[in-house]
Image (cartoon, grey):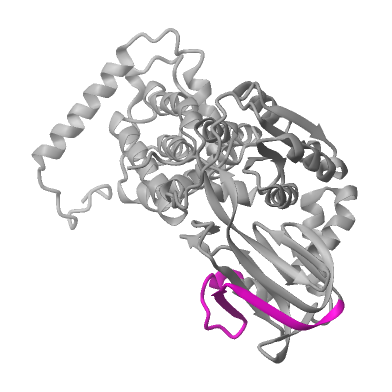
């Protein structure tokens, strides 16, 4: 008996349909190999090699993220996440399930062949899966960037047949798997467009076709110059005032005295100042995101200049709630969050280091220093009982978790303060992490959550820090938090009324 033949293995039976499909696949491969593609010879082999190990897509994600818009950053992250899932699936399941040999290269001209031929099995195509996953993931967040990436992804997929390393069916199967991976990621982390924010309560606000009557104050420290230029192009008759952070409150007051609509471009702290002035002057507020996080604008559905300009031109606006804190003669508002405990300490430490080492490194350093500190940062009486707390968080509106995505508000006029508490105890880092993962769960030894209209704390120690929309102040004694329903009129894109 020949050692190359194992008679104990049953010979597979004939599968007519499978054999016809494989034969068709082979004929298509040979047809592609016989075609003359002179324009592709200097491009496709290089493009195919550049996509090895996803390098092309990581570089593309960097370019997309560098555009500095929230939608583009989310598109880049979603594209990379989809690629990672597709690649993991291909390497752990796909290649091991169907051990198909690579095509014979006899019919492929030598000028097209790769210098290093792949040694893995042929089905499905990992390059095609990665390309399709990245392009689909990007398109789910940003159709504009998706349209730009799609031709490159298609070329990478076609290059695998062109260079002779895959059959057409390998490419099709890989592309289908990649698109499926993008949809799977969207199931875990929904896109913002999947959730339609409540369009009510609608508010009466002036429609300004060219922006006449709107005065926009832009914080130059927020890196918003590109958006300001775009806003000037979209609303040429709007007045735009660019100023330094310390000049923002004064310029907003001046703008409110002469504006029909008060506009602001900056981060959450700048938006907080503008919201307070708009409330005092009873003016509608137009918010153009220009900071790092822009929670308020993004939860409104205003992601860029186009969205804001469209709402202002159409007069589309809603009423939103505002949170308010009072401590003796000290009072203020918040449109996002108000917190006591670890977070204000972290903000203070971050601000101390950010001008030396940058915002993100300063944030990491601040977290390490605060969480390693001894003693609870907050002790207060809640419901008549003194409690040590690591964190008390009050959100202006209920925060909802979307799959594995960070929480966001779907309704900015729900009348609720979303109060989360992390109880005192040992190992604050673990307790805070457990609270973050618990989301809205209320039965936890480390974490509690409740939705209320008002909250009162007493016995707050002197010098306790309170953070509101990224700003920090000191409080002591009694601190009251309350909700002011539908207090502020803001522009946001709205669907047409039925």
Q: Residue furthest bottom?
A: 385
Q: In terms of depth relative to the viewer, which is nearer, 495 or 72? A: 495
Q: Is residue 95 left or right of residue 288?
A: left
Q: Quadrant of residue 472?
A: bottom right
Count all numbered tags in the image, as a single digit: 0
Q: Quadrant of residue 470?
A: bottom right
Residue placed at 63% from the left, 36% from the top? 62
Q: Quadrant of residue 370?
A: bottom right
- Residue 458 counted in the magenta span: yes
With respect to residue 234, does 65 lie above or below?
below
Q: In terms of depth relative to the viewer, which is nearer, 136 or 478? A: 478
Q: In terms of depth relative to the viewer, which is nearer, 415 or 125? A: 415
Magenta stretch in the rendered image = 436-462
Residue placed at 78% from the left, 68% from the top? 466
- The image position of residue 262, as x and y in percent, is 68, 39
- Residue 389 counted in the magenta span: no
Q: Is residue 64 left or right of residue 476?
A: left
Which quadrant: the C terminus? top left
Q: In terms of depth relative to the viewer, which is nearer, 306 or 105? A: 306
Q: Is residue 439 left or right of residue 358?
A: left
- The image position of residue 96, as x and y in percent, is 36, 51
Residue placed at 9% from the left, 38% from the top? 16
Residue placed at 50% from the left, 63% from the top? 414
With respect to residue 143, does 372 lie above or below?
below
- The image position of residue 419, as x and y in percent, is 61, 73
Residue 495 visible to the viewer: yes
């Amino acid at each position: 008996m020949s050692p190359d033949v194992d008679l104990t293995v049953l010979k597979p039976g004939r599968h007519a349909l499978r054999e016809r499909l494989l034969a068709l696949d082979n004929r298509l491969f040979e047809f592609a190999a016989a075609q003359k593609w002179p324009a592709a010879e200097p491009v496709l082999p290089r493009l195919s090699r550049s996509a090895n190990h996803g390098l092309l897509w990581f570089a593309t994600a960097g370019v997309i993220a560098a555009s500095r818009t929230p939608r583009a950053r989310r598109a880049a992250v979603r594209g990379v996440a989809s690629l990672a899932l597709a690649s993991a699936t291909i390497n752990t399941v796909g290649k091991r399930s169907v051990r198909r040999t690579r095509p014979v290269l006899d019919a492929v001209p030598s000028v097209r062949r790769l210098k290093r031929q792949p040694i893995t099995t042929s089905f499905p195509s990992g390059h095609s899966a990665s390309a399709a996953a990245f392009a689909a993931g990007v398109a789910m967040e940003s159709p504009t960037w998706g349209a730009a990436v799609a031709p490159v992804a298609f070329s990478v997929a076609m290059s695998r047949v062109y260079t002779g390393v895959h059959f057409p069916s390998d490419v099709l199967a890989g592309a289908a798997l990649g698109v499926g991976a993008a949809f799977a990621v969207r199931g875990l982390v929904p896109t913002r467009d999947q959730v339609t924010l409540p369009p009510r309560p609608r508010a009466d606000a002036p429609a300004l076709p060219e922006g006449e009557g709107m005065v926009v104050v832009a914080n130059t420290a927020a890196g918003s110059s590109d958006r300001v230029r775009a806003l000037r192009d979209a609303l040429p008759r709007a007045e735009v005032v660019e100023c330094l952070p310390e000049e923002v409150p004064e310029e907003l007051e001046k703008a409110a005295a002469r504006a029909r609509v008060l506009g602001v471009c900056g981060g959450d702290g700048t938006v907080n100042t503008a919201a307070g002035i708009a409330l005092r002057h009873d003016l509608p507020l137009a918010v153009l995101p220009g900071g790092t996080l822009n929670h308020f604008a993004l939860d409104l559905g205003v992601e860029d200049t186009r969205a804001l300009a469209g709402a202002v031109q159409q007069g589309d606006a809603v009423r939103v709630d505002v949170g308010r804190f009072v401590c003796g003669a000290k009072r203020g508002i918040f449109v996002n969050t108000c917190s006591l405990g670890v977070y204000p300490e972290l903000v203070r430490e971050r601000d101390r280091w950010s001008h030396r080492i940058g915002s993100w490194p300063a944030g990491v350093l601040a977290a390490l220093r605060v969480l390693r500190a001894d003693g609870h940062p907050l002790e207060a009486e809640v419901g008549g009982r003194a409690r040590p707390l690591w964190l008390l968080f009050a959100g202006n509106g209920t925060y909802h978790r979307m799959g594995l995505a960070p929480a966001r508000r779907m309704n900015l006029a729900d009348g609720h303060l979303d109060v989360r508490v992390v109880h005192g105890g040992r190992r604050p880092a673990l307790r805070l992490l457990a609270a973050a993962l618990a989301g809205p769960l209320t039965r936890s030894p480390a974490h509690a959550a409740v939705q209320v209209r008002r909250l009162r704390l007493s016995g707050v120690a002197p010098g306790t820090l309170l953070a509101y929309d990224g700003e920090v102040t000191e409080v002591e004694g009694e601190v009251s938090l309350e909700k002011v329903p539908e207090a502020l009129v803001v522009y946001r894109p709205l669907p047409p009324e039925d």
